[in-house]
Amino acid sequence: MQSGKQPVKLVIKNGWVLCPVCGKGKILKVNPDTTAHHLPRLCKRCGQETIVNIEAPEPASKETSA
């Protein structure tokens, strides 16, 4: 597990989170409104376990400038 390591920015391609270690394995399918905290995921390609944290996106402002 990744204890004490710096957070790594996750790469999302075509709705899939790619493995931050090998960059090729798909570890999690996500929707635009997906949130997750401390979710362990195993990459089938390289075998490394990664803890995933996905924050909720900022809501779009409905105010308009006049």
Image (spheres, helix red, strand yellow):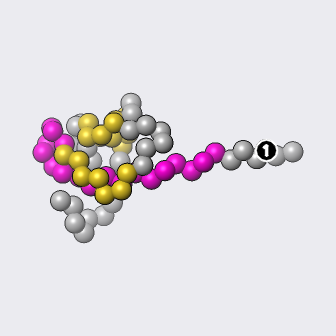
Camera sees residue 36: yes
Q: Residue furthest bottom?
A: 4
Above or below, 55 relative to 19: below
Residue lying farthest to the left in this orientation:
47
Residue 6, compared with residue 44, is above or below; it is: below
Where residue 11 appears, as percent x and y from the top left, is 36, 43
Which residue type carries mark 1?
Thr
From the image, give the main secondary structure of the stretch colored magenta: loop
Q: Quadrant of the N terminus?
A: bottom left
Residue 50 % position (x, y): 23, 52
| Residue plotted at (19% across, 42% down) | 43
Residue 58 forms part of the magenta stretch: yes
Residue 29 on the magenta span: no
Question: Residue at the right extreme?
Answer: 66
Q: Nearer the viewer, residue 47 or 62?
A: 62
Q: Position of residue 64 (x, y in %)?
A: 79, 44
Residue 15, percent from left and from top:
39, 33
Residue beneath the point at 47% across and 39% down = 32
Please tell me which residue is depicted at 68% across the width and 47% down the height of the picture: 61
Label 1 crowd (10 A; few <14 / some 14-19 / many >=20): few
Q: Is residue 21 visible to the viewer in this orientation of the structure?
A: no
Q: Residue 20, relative to residue 38: is it above or below? A: above
Position of 53 with respect to 42 (left or right) is right
Quarter the C terminus occupies: top right
Specify the segment rendered in magenta. 43-60
Q: Secondary structure at mark 1?
A: loop
Question: Is residue 64 shown left or right of residue 30?
Answer: right
Residue tagged by mark 1? 64
Please tell me in which quadrant of the rendered image residue 2 appears: bottom left
Q: In the rendered picture of this protein, how many numbered marks are placed on residues? A: 1
